[in-house]
Amino acid sequence: YNSVVFVQGFHESYVEYKPLSTDTFPEPQVNGCQIARDETFLNDVLQKWKDADHSLVIESKPLEYKEGTSNLFGHLVRRVRRSEKSEEKLPGILLFPTEAGALDSFLYYKADCLLQKFNCVVFVCDLFSDPYGWGWSPDRTNFNQVCDNLVADNYQLLRDRVVSSLNAFLDEVPEVDPHRLAAIGWGLNGRP
């Protein structure tokens, strides 16, 4: 298993940890990637985010990883570290996407909220193999096809992508304690 850093689209501007804040999302599209349905949605998320606790500085970096032959595009989010040499093991939270995918600005707001409360590392996971935010597209053809594939064959592809997300998280973030993990989130638009 090898994962590589993704360096195009929304992720293009950095490959190392960079500060994460409301300023990260100046508009619904960033570098050609849709991170919010529209300006109203983005403004609502950003207002909630601005009203939230900001006592700690949060940072993130993109992480491209694989499931089979598919590339998946997640983000690692954590508190700014005083030293990269710290040996402290932290809990990890896998944050699975809404139907909008892993580029949804709402997920980064939620990751920030979690990190303001808990000293952990959050991995915004990708289930859809969506580097551009097409989950926000009004044409649901691609989204519906991907979701149908995820739930086909007794959810095999969904399970494979969840396991790939977990493996990438543990492989790429040595400070995460594999015995203290949580997983939250996701929506497949009402699919059982």
Image (cartoon, rainbow, N blue to C red):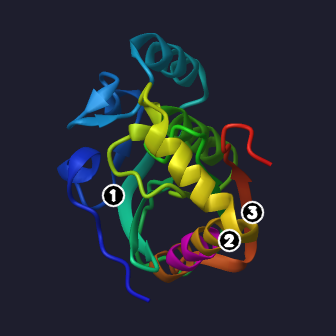
Decide: is 90 above or below 185.
Answer: below
Residue 39 left/right relative to 150: left
Tell which circle, 1 or 2, labels the residue nearer the N-terminal end: 1
Query: Circle 2 sits on which residue?
Result: 159
Residue 152 left/right relative to 40: right
Residue drawn at x 71%, y 66% is 155
Image spot of residue 107 (x, y percent): 55, 40
Foreground mark, 2 or 3? 2
| Residue, far bottom | 1
Residue drawn at x 68%, y 43% is 187
Disc 2 and disc 3: Cα gap in Å?
16 Å
Q: Nearer the viewer, residue 46 or 70?
A: 70
Image spot of residue 80 (x, y percent): 44, 54
Tell which circle, 3 or 1, labels the residue nearer the N-terminal end: 1
Element type at mark 1:
loop
* Crowd rating for badge 1 (residues with CA inside 10 Å; few <14, some 14–19, many 20+): some
Q: Nearer the viewer, residue 173 or 68?
A: 68
Query: Circle 1 sits on which residue?
Result: 17
Foreground mark, 1 or 2? 2
* Crowd rating for badge 3 (residues with CA inside 10 Å; few <14, some 14–19, many 20+): few
What is the three-letter code of the residue carrying label 3?
Ala
Location of the N terminus (image quadrant): bottom left
